Image: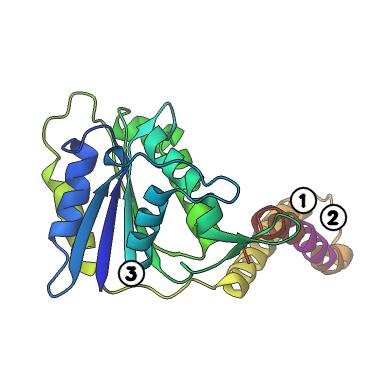
Amino acid sequence: MKILGILGAHRHDGLTARMLSTVLENVPAPHTTETIYLEDYDFHPDQAGKRDPVLDQLTAKLLESDVWVLAAPTYWGGLAGKMKDFLDCMRGRLVRFDHKGGTHPDRFENKHYLSITSCYAGTFENFVSGITDTSFRTIDKIMSAAGLIKINELVLPGTLFMKQIPAGKLAECKRLGSKLITKPKRDDNTLKRYIELFCMVAVMAFLTMGIQFLFHLISAGEFWVVYASFVLIFFMLLASILHFFTVVKHRRR
C-alpha cells in the first residue's frame, strides 16, 4: 500500500508540514510513503484540447497511491491558496461530468484520505467559532465528489507563536499514521440516522406536550392522537428538509 502526502503550504518545514511528516513517518513497513510539495510544481488548468503535463505527473502519483494525506493551513477562515488552487486545477480529473454538469466519481473512487490543517486561532476560539471548519468542508466536498472515503482529520490550533508541536498533538499524528493502513469502509448509516432522528423528535414532542398537558393546554382524551400526528408530521417535514440540504442539493453519485 502507498500513502501519498500532499503539502499545500508556503513552507516545506513549517508546523503543518511537520504534522504531515510525523503522520507519514509512523506508517508501518512494508507500506511506502511519498510527499509532494505543491510549491515545487508549476501546474495550470487543462485547456481545451491541451492537457497540462505537470498535472499529468501529479495525477499519476494520485492514481498509484491508496491513501492521500492532504495538509494545508487555514488562512482567513479558508483553505490555503496553493492547496485550493491544486484542487481547482484538478477538477476535471477528479470527477466525471455528465451532460448536465453533474459530477460523478471516476478513477479515484474508493481511495481514502486524511485531512490536516492548522490556524493561528487558539483551541477555544477555534472550538467556538469553527475557523478551520471551512477548510475541512472544502476538502470533504471535493473528496466526496471524487468518491474518496474519509479516514479522519487533524487540526493544530494556536500556531501564531508556536515553535514546537505539542506532545499530545504529535502523539495523535503518530497514532493516525500507524492506523492509515487499516482503511475504514464507506459510512452508509443513513437509515440508522433517520431512526435516531425520529426518536429524538418523539422524545422532544412528548416532553413538550407533557408540559402543555400539565398546564391544561391539552386534554387527556386528545393527548395521544395529537401526539402521534404531531410526531409524524414534524418528522416528515424535518426529514425532507434535511434530505434536501444533505443529499439532493449537494448530490454525490
Measured from the top left, where is residue 80 in percent x and y?
38, 34
Is residue 18 in view from this perspective?
Answer: yes
**Where is 180 relative to 142, above or below?**
below
Label 3: which residue? 66
Magenta residue check for 232: yes
Label 2: which residue? 218
Asked if marks 3 and 2 touch (Cβ < 8 Å), the reply is no
Figure quadrant of residue 32:
bottom left
In this view of the protein, which residue sits in the foreground, 192 or 179? 179
Label 2: few (<14), some (14–19) or many (≥20) C-alpha neighbours in 10 Å: some
Q: Is residue 179 left or right of residue 191?
A: left
Q: Residue at x 23, y 68 (%)?
A: 179
Of pointers 1 and 3, the one earlier in the residue sequence: 3
Q: Is residue 51 left or right of residue 66?
A: right
Which residues, given as a range, are shown in magenta? 229-238
**On the rendered image, what quadrant is the C terminus found in?**
bottom right
Q: Residue at x 23, y 61 (%)?
A: 176
Label annotation for residue 212: 1
In this view of the protein, which residue sits in the foreground, 142 or 121? 142
Element class at badge 1:
helix
Measured from the top left, where is residue 219 in percent x and y?
86, 59
Magenta residue check for 147: no
Figure quadrant of residue 246:
bottom right
Q: Residue at x 51, y 52 (%)?
A: 142
Looking at the rendered structure, the kind of residue marked 3 is Asp
**What is the distance, in whole Å, between disc 3 and disc 2 at their CAs?**
60 Å
Asked if marks 2 and 1 touch (Cβ < 8 Å), the reply is yes
**What is the distance, in whole Å, between disc 1 and disc 3 at their CAs?**
56 Å
In this view of the protein, which residue sits in the foreground, 52 or 252? 52
Measured from the top left, where is residue 141 in percent x and y?
53, 52
